[in-house]
Amino acid sequence: MALQRGRYALPTVDDALAAAHRLTGVVSGLSAALHWGWAVQTVPDRPVVTVPRGRRIRSATAGAVSLHVADLGADDVDGIVTSKDRTLLDCLRREPFDSALAVADSALRDGFPRPRLLAITRDARGPGATQARQVAQSADARAANPFESVLRAIAGRVEGLSVVPQVSIREPHFLGRPDLVDERLRIILEADSFEWHGGRTALARDARRYNAFVVAGWLVLRFSWEDVMLQPLDVQAVLEAAVVGRTEARCPTCLPA
């Protein structure tokens, strides 16, 4: 379940802190991200805990947590939780790209300095280091939430599509600020959450806004939370078809024979 407005963070973080105490380890990964107040794509179903190498853990105890083994330095730990730097690096290394991007976007949105994010991933070595650098380069504080971050990650896998979060569109008057925009192809992607768009007033407002975009020549694609989070390949297929259609319409000679 995706984190929304921190509703699931507190009990999850408390469970992770308790597990870390029991194992004499530290809260890490997505559990540490939640501790630092960062939103995640999916709340982990078990607390994420890191213990030192050589620590003997009973199998029954280990099964109750997502256990990682590492020798952490003093700068890697803040109390009983991995530091913000180490938490970001762990998430960007270990998590799938979509999940990692959601954490990185949230950290930047929360005020974590982008130059620091780039620096800690630039110096990373070992498994996952290449992905960590790619995520850091793609991270954007303008992303509103994990839903939007994951949709942007899917769009990033579509050749010819280049979307930017929260672009204000004026033609010439202000039409709106969609979730994701490809200005070259004039494609708008909207992450439509019932929480934010439910109700008659919101429905009427959104209908007027989407109609204004379409009349101005934009292709508006709307995606539900279930599609983005649970059916990413279907979303990607729609985006790929949209790129082909828009490229053909706007530049017939741009497509390969």
Image: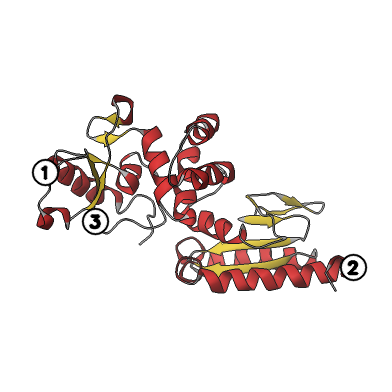
- Please indicate whether residue 214 sits to the left or right of residue 37 in the image: right
Residue linked to disc 3: 46
Q: The C terminus appears in which quarter of the rendering?
A: bottom right
Residue linked to disc 2: 253
* Label 2 CA crowd tier, 10 Å (few <14, some 14–19, many 20+): few
Furthest residue toward right: 253
Residue type highlighted by circle 3: Arg
Return the mark for residue 22.
1
* Label 1 CA crowd tier, 10 Å (few <14, some 14–19, many 20+): few
- Taking depth in this image into account, of 249 and 208 the one nearest to the observer is 249
Residue type highlighted by circle 1: Arg
For mark 2, give the secondary structure.
helix
Quadrant in the rendering for residue 178: bottom right
Query: Residue at image x 83%, y 71%?
Result: 248
Q: The N terminus appears in which quarter of the rendering?
A: bottom left
For mark 1, give the secondary structure.
helix
Return the mark for residue 215.
none
Spot occupied by residue 21 in the image (x, y as percentages of width and height): 14, 40
Nearer-N-terminus badge (3/2): 3
| Whole-number angstrom distance, CA of label 1 to CA of label 3 | 14 Å
Residue type highlighted by circle 2: Thr
Spot occupied by residue 93 in the image (x, y as percentages of width and height): 43, 46
- Taking depth in this image into account, of 215 and 48 the one nearest to the observer is 48
Kindly tell me whether residue 179 is visible in this rendering.
yes
| Whole-number angstrom distance, CA of label 1 to CA of label 2 | 64 Å
- Please indicate whether residue 245 sits to the left or right of residue 45 in the image: right
Spot occupied by residue 31 in the image (x, y as percentages of width and height): 30, 47
Nearer-N-terminus badge (1/2): 1
- Please indicate whether residue 97 sits to the left or right of residue 70 in the image: right
